Image (spheres, helix red, strand yellow):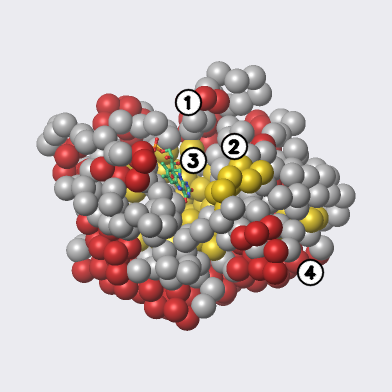
Amino acid sequence: MPTATLFEPLAFEHFEVKNRVFMAPMTRLRADGGVPTELMAEYYRQRAGAGLIVTECTAVSDTSMGTYINAPGMFNDAQEHGWSRVVDAVHGAGGRVFLQLWHAGRVAHRSLMPEQRAPLAPSAISGVGELHTLDGKQPLSEPGAMTAEEIWQVVAEFAAAARRAESAGFDGVELHAAFGYLIEQFLTSGANRRQDEYGGSAAKRRRFLLDIIDAVQGQCSLPVGVKLSPSNTAHGIEDVDRIETFGALFEELAGCGLAYIHVMQPLEHDRGKPGLIEDTVTFARRCFPATIIANGGYDRTKAALALGSAVCDAVSFGTLFIANPELPAKLAGHDQLAMPDFGTVYGVPGNPPELGYTDYS
Ligand SMILES: Cc1cc2nc3c(=O)[nH]c(=O)nc-3n(C[C@H](O)[C@H](O)[C@H](O)COP(=O)(O)O)c2cc1C
């Protein structure tokens, strides 16, 4: 495998990106009723020095956004128009941007669902955790097991959102198959107890994701990436055999014509836990020969080492991009990095939305 540095370009099938310092998707909760705002366009424009920006997770339908207040969507014309302003701002500043498509599944609260209905999930098994609702913090609501029709409906929603992303001018889409949301719920044995063609074996648990990839690739011509977190335990995710589940998945994804896979390392509090894969990126590289974006806990030194050993082709940075909009230039210059104010990471009704968002230099 050829090795690279952080500041070299990387070629995708239809375009090249200027460096390998990518911006990881980050929910910031500044949308207005699901519609991306001018301020969001400014936020992403400020970070266009990244080789590639992956946007915050974006709901494919109104049933998919029961997690957050003020997350964006991509299922109506106003949202598509708002996103097209974001794309124009990033392209105008010389950047590239993929839209991250997301369905929350069981990581939701009824009060944030349309008609207060039960969240969707592969099986009627609740996730673990609490969400901010209009009535304060509440535990995740009990979900309903999706019918086959509901599964096909959500697959179609991903494809429709990808078509909108293409119309809005995005360079690609990333499917959010990580961090305990719907696609990861289907992939993992703790959340998926189905006994139909979407569950029962690791191969059947993969089918939902593979159907979405198929539908998206069939209905739009944008490059498609997939974000995965093989050692994630957030939101109550458990799996009987992560090596089997994710090893076979990576091998199958290698034949899917993806632009990349985006692989998250275990979070700090999960490191060393039994049953988890310690270095998910090195593990992925053994099964997946094409482009890998490594993510999770990387700094300049670790990123350079990972690229230098060819376990990945680019590194994405989340937290570091919050307070360092020009992160690639700072890394190249060995500049001191600023730390974010975690109290203003998420937009809160009543706070000026630019606070802790577009006011870092
Ligand atoms: C404020 C915040 C919001 C996040 N929102 C998302 C998201 O919308 N989609 C996603 O895939 N990951 C999300 N993540 C996870 C990041 O993409 C990334 O995987 C994680 O922060 C680890 O990378 P880092 O160590 O460079 O921060 C979020 C992380 C943070 C800090």
**How far is mark 1 from mark 4, CA to CA?**
38 Å
The residue carrying mark 4 is: 149
Q: Residues within 10 Å of mark 3 (few under 14, many from 20)?
A: many
Q: Residue at x 55, y 25 (%)?
A: 270
Q: Secondary structure at mark 3?
A: strand
Q: Which mark is residue 263?
A: 3
Q: Is mark 1 within 8 Å of ligand 1?
A: no
Query: Which of the 4 image quarters holds residue 160?
Result: bottom right
Residue 354 in which image quadrant: bottom left
The residue that label 2 is drawn on is 234
The amino acid type found where label 2 is placed reads Ala
| First in sequence: mark 1 vs mark 3 | 3
Where 98 falls versus 321 (above or below)?
below
**Residue type (three-letter) at the residue carrying disc 1:** Glu
Which residue corresponds to mark 1?
268
Residue 9: x and y in percent read 25, 49
> Please, what is the three-letter code of the amino acid marked with disc 4?
Glu
